[in-house]
Amino acid sequence: RRAPPSQARRAEVVFKLMDGYLKNDSVSLQKAILDHVEFTVARSRFSFDDFEAYQALSHSVRDRLIERWHDTHQYVKRKDPKRVYFLSLEFLMGRSLSNSIINLGIKDQCVEALSQLGFELEVLAEQEGDAALGNGGLARLSACIMDSLATLDFPAWGYGLRYQYGLFRQVILDGFQHEQPDYWLNFGNPWEIERVHISYPVKFYGTVEEEIVDGKKFKIWVPGETVEAVAYDNPIPGYGTRNTINLRLWAAKPSDQYDMESFNTGDYINAVINRQKAETISSVLYPDDRSYQGKELRLKQQYFFVSASLQDIVRRFKDLHTNFQEFPDKVALQLNDTHPSLMIAELMRVLVDEEHLDWNEAWGIVGKAFSFTTHIVVLEGLEKIPVDLLGSLLPRHLQIIYDINFLFVEDLKKRFGSDYDRLSRMSIVEEGPVKNVRMANLSIVSSHTVNGVSQVHSQILKTKVFKDFYELWPEKFQHKTNGVTQRRWIVGSNPGLCGLITKWLGTEAWIRNVDLLLGLRQHAANPELQEEWRMIRRVNKKRLADYIEAMSGVKVCIDAMFDVQVKRIHEYKRQLLNVLSIIHRYDCIKNMKKGDRRKVVSRVCLIGGKAAPGYEIAKKIIKLVHVVAEKINNDPDIGDLLKLVFIPDYNVSVAELVVPGSDLSQHISTAGHEASGTSSMKFLMNGCLLLATADGSTLEIIEEIGEDNLFVFGAKLHEVPSLRDKARDFEVPRQFARVVRMVREGYFGFGDYFESLCDSIEGNGGDFYLLGNDFMSYLEAQAAADKTFVDQERWTQMSILSAAGSGRFSTDRTVGEYAEKTWGITPCKCP
Ligand code: CJB
């Protein structure tokens, strides 16, 4: 056999053949598209439809991403800086085509290349389905963070799971939510690269045994089942830089490793079928964003993700290093909530059982590597794993967690003596009828930093949820206010506003340096800017109105105020408060003298969001929106004064249409319940005014743009506990009692069905979320919004000031803070 050519010889050949990088002029792009039509999509160059054109364009764009992605990897590998690994079980990426084209800076060329072939970029972009591998805020935040990490040139990786079924499709039948599977890979996914050669075995079940190596005892885990994790890579391009980072998602495949026995039993067909079951591990995303406790499959998903990611990270580390003491100098492991927190026990297992480090040495490394972000505000929301379940699926990990806890509690005893209440609150293992591992406690004990996702959330963590831990380790606690990326949420989804901002700031630099948006403040009262601003907003409203009509059949007038609440349906987010106020508005209009109606500000109320499949109350809220909408929209007496429309199947790409077209958006959670909230930031960037409670990141928005520039209402955080205590004696306002009665008594039909919903806000000891209490101040805020809307100059000025003040809420700022204060990483820009 001939010897393979040396690297240098191969490079020589490649360079001789290569004509530089792929070109980005429109002719080169056109040729690339046609080649992909013919050879990738396997259709004739002379005849292909929109979907095939989308596929070919996506592959052409992907080729360009891959070049940059390779270069970034090679460069970062050579430089070997400390890298951050962002570990999240959920990424809500949405569509990739437009975002990639924008970040590569090739939009105009693509438009031109396509137009000569008879296609429109916007139409092709619509062909793409959403990658909805996440539930809500936490998952979308992960996606925005990836965009900022790439744009700011940070050496970073994202790790997640490649679910075959993303978040369910919401179908509304007769006003009720039904869940349909989202088999998003049906038509292929041009944005991922399958890496069949990058795969790792992941073990489950089995027993723990001892082995002796060089006279020392070590534990070894003998697994009962092994599945294979295969990597799927998703290049994430930065904007205005060549840096393109990787989001590696794992898919489960059957393993060949321990299969012989099952195939030798003679039942070949069943053996094949059983093997195939391995794939179920990564098959479906859990659709409830708050509770999956005690589910074996969920725990399997978590460990599958953790084990594969850590094997990959350790392999990369060992490529260049032999001494594990250097691990924390090269690796920052970011836990996005507790979902990946099993990695703590896994890293201990790898270091102690496989690498044969001392426990203390290993524990020192773990403590320097991990940082932990929690997105939960209330103690009851924290994740727990039943000890029995953990012990059967991951016997060695349970031992390790017990050992970590033993040493931790021993330390606590030295410090707090016999304060057993405190010890039992802080213990990683919760005693009780069902013993649980408290994943947040494990994460805090093992991480060097812990943070909340807004200022007030971080404060609540210190004073309530993790008070004991804060008293023990005040230096561990940090705060990092969330953000969103302006690349997707202005440049991509609101090109009109993007152009206008660039024109008035005289530069595009704000797309990378979003603080420059502050420059808009000085022009906020300028009538010329105001006029242009309103025109852009009108075009966006028209686009949204067309969508509403196409989807619901309801014609809406774009002169009306578009008033929007889109987010997951939760009692604490109080969509019910919104519906009740809409009923009140309807009732008031009905009871008005005809002449007075001229003063009514027309509203189009839009509500959208998914309810977790098992969340009955949330599903009833969706039905209520529908019955109320049915009544109002078909009342000839009301006409354009009020419309209510439910936006079905709310997702990232629907948000891209809704956000730029909204006048007013509502963020009305009971104070103390929204950790941060990020959709408010997208609306803010787009110049939509906020109607909000003083909760989560809204408090910081108020600080930034001033209370005069949004509509704030409702109980304050410090008032909530005493209001709850007094709830039984609280006399609800008659307006509130009246609208609840209308629902209860069947004014909109389905009275019986809504009884439990009404009880949740009126029953004995009910109204935990204080709807009755906040109702009047909510109506006042609504009235203030109406009054301001009539004064379009004032409204537009507030709108401009909102966008101008939104820079602080970019993930560029968030990520910069994490890099400096938590991860200890610096940019590594690929030349
Ligand atoms: N959040 O989306 C989720 N899922 C959870 O399981 C817990 C919290 C949300 O995370 C967002 C990102 O930090 C926050 O903005 C939001 O307030 C929180 O509810």
Image: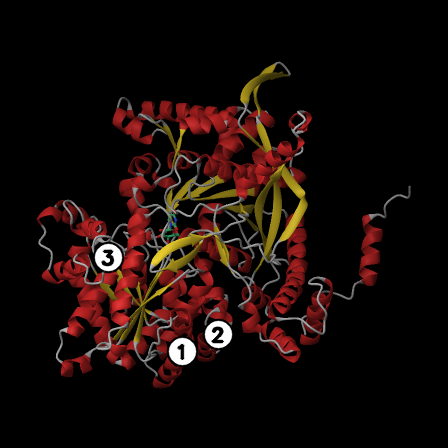
Residue at the extreme top: 215
Q: In this view, does 253 lie above or below 352?
A: below
Whether residue 244 appears in this view of the structure is yes
**Neighbour class for label 3 at 10 Å: few (<14), some, many (≥20)?**
some
Q: Is residue 165 left or right of residue 707?
A: right
How far across and down, in percent of the image, does residue 325 sit?
57, 33
The residue at the point 70 percent across, 65 percent down is: 36
Residue under circle 3? 750
Front residue of this view, candidates 130 and 91: 130
**Neighbour class for label 1 at 10 Å: few (<14), some, many (≥20)?**
some
Whether residue 257 appears in this view of the structure is no
Classify residue 732 by image quadrant: bottom left
Q: Is residue 336 left or right of residue 583?
A: right
Mark with earlier residue (2, 1)? 2
Amino acid carrying label 2: it is Pro
Residue at the extreme bottom: 528
* Camera-nearest label, 2 or 3: 3
Residue under circle 2? 495
- For the rendered model, the colour scheme is secondary structure
Amino acid carrying label 3: it is Phe
Residue at the extreme right: 1
Residue 702 disc label = none
Mark with earlier residue (3, 1)? 1
Mark with earlier residue (2, 3)? 2
* Camera-nearest label, 2 or 1: 1
* Camera-nearest label, 3 or 1: 3
The secondary structure type at the circle numbered 3 is: loop
Distance CA(mark 2)–CA(mark 3): 44 Å
Classify residue 273 by image quadrant: top right
Residue 542 disc label = 1
